[in-house]
Amino acid sequence: MSDPKVLAAQQWVNATYGAVSGYVRCPEDGKTGWSTMYALTRALQHELGITALSDSFGPTTLSKLTALGPIGTGTTNRNIVKIVQHGLFCKGYWGGAGDGVYDFSTITSVQQLKANMGVAAGDGFVQPKIFKALLTMDAYVLLAGGSEEILKIQRYLNGAYLDRSTFFVMPCDGHYSRDVQQALMKAIQYEIGIPPDQATGNFGPATQDGLRAHPAGPGTNATWMRLFSAACVFNGMVDNVITSFKTAWDDKISQYVRAFQKFSVLEENGVGDYRTWAQLLVSTGDPDRPAGASDTRFHISTTRARALVQAGYKVVGRYLDEDADSTLDKELQPGELDAIFAGGMRVFPISQYNGRSIDNFTYPQGYQHGLRAHARAVGYGFNRGTVIYFAVDYDATDEQITSNILPYFHGVQAGLANQGKRYIAGVYGSRNVCGRVSAEAYARYSFVSGMSWGFSGNLGFPMPSNWSFNQIKEFRFAAGSDSFDLDRDVHRPGSDPACGPENVNGTSSPVAAYLAYIDGLYATAVSYGRGDPSLRVLEYLRFPNYVDFYDGWEVLIGDVDRAWIDYAKAHAPAKVTTFVDPSYGVTVNVDHFGATANAVLLKGSGPGSTPTGEGWRGDFGGWGGDLSTFYGEWRAESDQNSSGYTFCRDRLAKINVQSSFSFNDLIEDVDGYLIGTAVRGGAKVHEAIRAHIGGTGHLSRFQRFVSGRYGNTAGIIAAAKTMLCDVGPDDTLDALRTAAIRKVSGALSLMPAWLPADKLDEFLRGYADTLQALVGQENARRAGR
């Protein structure tokens, strides 16, 4: 949307300086952007007598301004005052008349700007560093998706350290970024005693020594507690534990530190020791910390494997293949897997064909690499369900991730799906690459290139929650007269276990035990001899977690046959409670799937699915209930996440993001709908599950769900709106929905029907677009595009 005051700024600066040598005109469109800020910067440089104009507000510009003094009521150069006023307009502040007179309106706006920066407002004059910040696109108010705690930290750091020569105003928008990370590092260096002109923001030896001397814990002074708690806040939620910006140690931050240490595979002592500090601040953490995994381009013999085990390494990453013109000879060799296993190690496969520049990443290349990695993995004998890490071995920017890296990984997924999805895609790269590829292309696990601490993708980004390996140091490993290059990797327990001899040259699949269990349970239901065996199977699957009266399940779809439950306990096979999804490698909870399928079987799905119109109950037993709780989660955080669409984009159905509607929740809902619908149509439940999970049904699950339940995007939005706002005369269901929203939101007045239509609609569009993106991936995979 065009802003008349921004347009006036653009017209003025172009008209005034258009003929000046070195000036670059900005668009006259009324929209604030870097081109306008650069134009104002060049205009300022001209007014300061600088002849070599530049987009950069560098040391020369700063020193000339310093010599001039703060810009205010005594400034005689009216054009410089106009630059201030127009800069304020571009920042969203009222700069006054824009006539070069530093009046009360200008003073008040500058004071507000400085207060938003966390800097003392004072007399409302513009000091050089404030001027530099004014001519940027940085925001100084909370932006959508930002955190109030991060905003507090940003303002504190600006206010506390702006007088240091190497510290400059950082954004105050509530978002953790590279600039914010660097500001915190400089603050730490100042407090350690490093001279300001030597405070670079890098994690060097002096900084490391200083942190060793300043562990955080009970009794830590207020300044160091602020810095330590800021580092904790920047690393975000860990295993549902968060902390806040604070001045004193307490039990809450100790709880957070323990969760972070467990997540990071550090000693869980609950205090901020050096290794915890290091892991909070840089992607390497302490590169000399214990690490039980490794990766290398060199061949691993039994002798080498035994030497690695002796040195504490239990896992090694090796390459499936290499480019035809490569001279590195890095790929696995015949018999090498046997040698690795004989030496007592496990292995994880890596796929990389160059991968060191943006030109290596396109959808067609990803598709071909998926096919080639599949063929190589089959050739080596890796079993179904093995995770293959596809490498992004350069510092991809956020824009490049959008333009090239994500399409490449969609291609990888398509190539693997073309071969029946025998293998699961993982990702190697910076924290940002791993996080975005996991969230948007559904890579199951992340292998983080943490030792590349200078990568922009590792600065200002927390560790992805689905990390399995963190590469922290490259060195020369020596055992006797033998030596070779090796990367040290921290391996996270409970993540990708890597492959042992049991994972090679076998015929089993990750779903074999589950399918055998379902077959056995169905046979038990047949022998029970009362009622539909398929219904009995689904009842047993949802028991005991989805039958409780107080949680609403008995009210929603009724109780289970208790005699059958007792019979099954005595005669059915041992319960299988989870299995690994063959498409995406996430853990599927059998009870949630069973509850969803049971609800659809009994109540249908949609308003016309039963004569009594109970289909909305079937929906609420799956996607409708999860969407209601997710809506409540958004409303509880709406102050920091005002856009419902952005909240869905960032949190809904993500492999690597914790939320009330996770990706495995969505798979359980979708599969529950498909199996429940199939059984309503006459299929036997064990046969329907085998065709879906054991066959190829899972490869098109999202397309069949959207087509069968909603029809199209408009249908998704309409059904979701009805579910959240008006489920008709079913007062019981209305009460259950309200309870689900309130349970997560913690409030009594956040019902969707009371939300402005545009706010609710963007949330609904976020849900619809999430589903359609998954459908698009499936369609592209089948088409081989």
Image: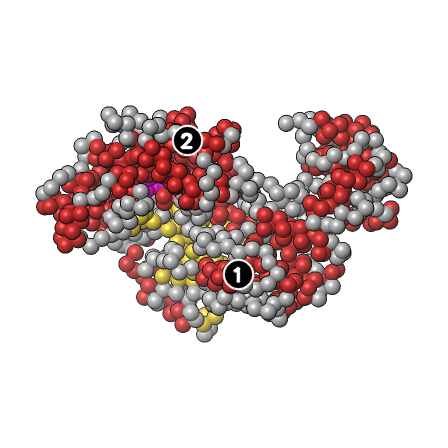
Query: For the residues carrying marks 1 and 2, which lies nearer the camera in this image?
Result: 2
Q: Counting other residues with Cα less than 10 Å from the Cα at mark 2, is it few (<14), some (14-19), or many (20 or more)?
A: some
Q: Is residue 430 above or below residue 15?
A: below
Quarter where residue 666 is shown: top left
Q: For the residues labelled 1 and 2, say whether their Cβ atoms are less than 8 Å apart.
A: no
In which quadrant of the rendered image does the C terminus lie? Answer: top left
Horizontally, residue 545 falls left or right of residue 450, namely: left
- Residue 630 % position (x, y): 43, 41
Is 120 positioned to the left or the right of 558 in the image? right
Residue 171, above or below 722: below
Look at the magenta stretch and give its main secondary structure.
helix
Residue 256: x percent and y percent? 50, 59
Locate residue 452 relative to residue 689 in the image: left or right.
Answer: right
Q: Which residues are magenta?
A: 666-671
Which tag, 1 or 2, sits closer to the chain's start?
Answer: 1
Where does label 1 land, which residue? 253
> Residue 722's quadrant in the figure?
top left
Residue at mark 1 to residue at mark 2: CA–CA distance: 39 Å
In the picture, the quarter occupied by the N terminus is top right
- The colour mode here is secondary structure
Residue flagged by tag 1: what amino acid is it?
A: Ile
Secondary element under disc 2, as helix, strand or loop, is: helix
Residue at label 2? Answer: 725
Could you tell me which residue is drawn at 29 percent across and 55 percent down? 504
